[in-house]
Amino acid sequence: MDARLAFWTVAFVDLVAAAALAVRGVALARRGELVRHARSMRAAALLVALFLAAYVGKLALLGREALATWSPAAIGVLRFHELCVLAMLLAGGAALALGRRLARGAPLAREAAGSAAPSPTRRLHRLAGRTAVGGAVLGAATAALVLAGMYARAQLVDLPALARAERAAQEAP
């Protein structure tokens, strides 16, 4: 296993952990455990931030992936994965900012118990959060596909359908 593949394997574990923490955070919010919800979401955000810092280092030390060796289908999966991650980053950043605004200005416990109508900020926070969690879960699922392709190209696993697609892409003019 080369350094790039090792990096992406660790990154996959990081993304799955971040997505799991985010899903747990949603469950906590639904139960009204808002302090634990916030803690879980901050932990997920920390894992994402650690990945971003590591990715910058990976680019500096190892460079980009050689996409010329990938099939069009594999590149399509990668691009969809990147869109999911972008949605997670943008919506997650918005949800984090809105959550901090709510924590400073609104009694969250009263709102969560339903004793007051949800504020526009709270509604936006929920929408951004749902989008971010969806992006994280889809990002983790598609990361598994991307990583499987990387393992297959490195001949660490045998995926016949992927191997056929890769050969066809290399033989095409």
Image (tube, grey):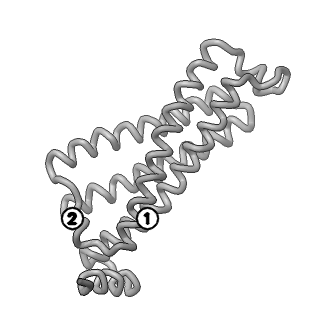
Picture quadrant of residue 75: bottom left
- Which amino acid does the dot numbered 2 rest on? Ala
Could you say which is closer to the camera, residue 13 or residue 77?
A: 77
Mark 1, secondary structure of its residue: helix
- Which amino acid does the dot numbered 1 rest on? Ala
Question: Label 1 to label 2, Cα distance in Å?
Answer: 18 Å
Q: Is residue 81 above or below residue 56?
A: below
Point 55% across, 43% down: residue: 132
Point 43% across, 68% down: residue: 145
Picture quadrant of residue 100: top right
Point 73% across, 22% down: residue: 119
Could you say which is closer to the camera, residue 4 or residue 81?
A: 81
Label 2 environment density (alpha carbons within 10 Å; few <14, some 14–19, many ≥20): few
On the image, the x and y values in percent for residue 30 come to 73, 38
Q: Is residue 95 above or below residue 154?
A: above
On the image, the x and y values in percent for residue 37 come to 62, 33
Could you say which is closer to the camera, residue 121 or residue 7?
A: 121
Q: Relative to residue 21, is residue 49 drawn left or right?
A: left
- Residue that mark 1 sits on: 144
Could you say which is closer to the camera, residue 79 or residue 139?
A: 79
Q: Relative to residue 84, is residue 8 drawn left or right?
A: left
Mark 2, secondary structure of its residue: loop
Q: Relative to residue 30, is residue 151 drawn left or right?
A: left
Picture quadrant of residue 156: bottom left
Q: Quadrant of the C terminus?
A: bottom left
On the image, the x and y values in percent for residue 12 come to 39, 56
On the image, the x and y values in percent for residue 123 come to 70, 30
- Residue that mark 2 sits on: 66
How many numbered discs?
2
In the picture, the disc for residue 9 is none
Question: Sequence order check: which comes first, mark 1 or mark 2?
Answer: 2
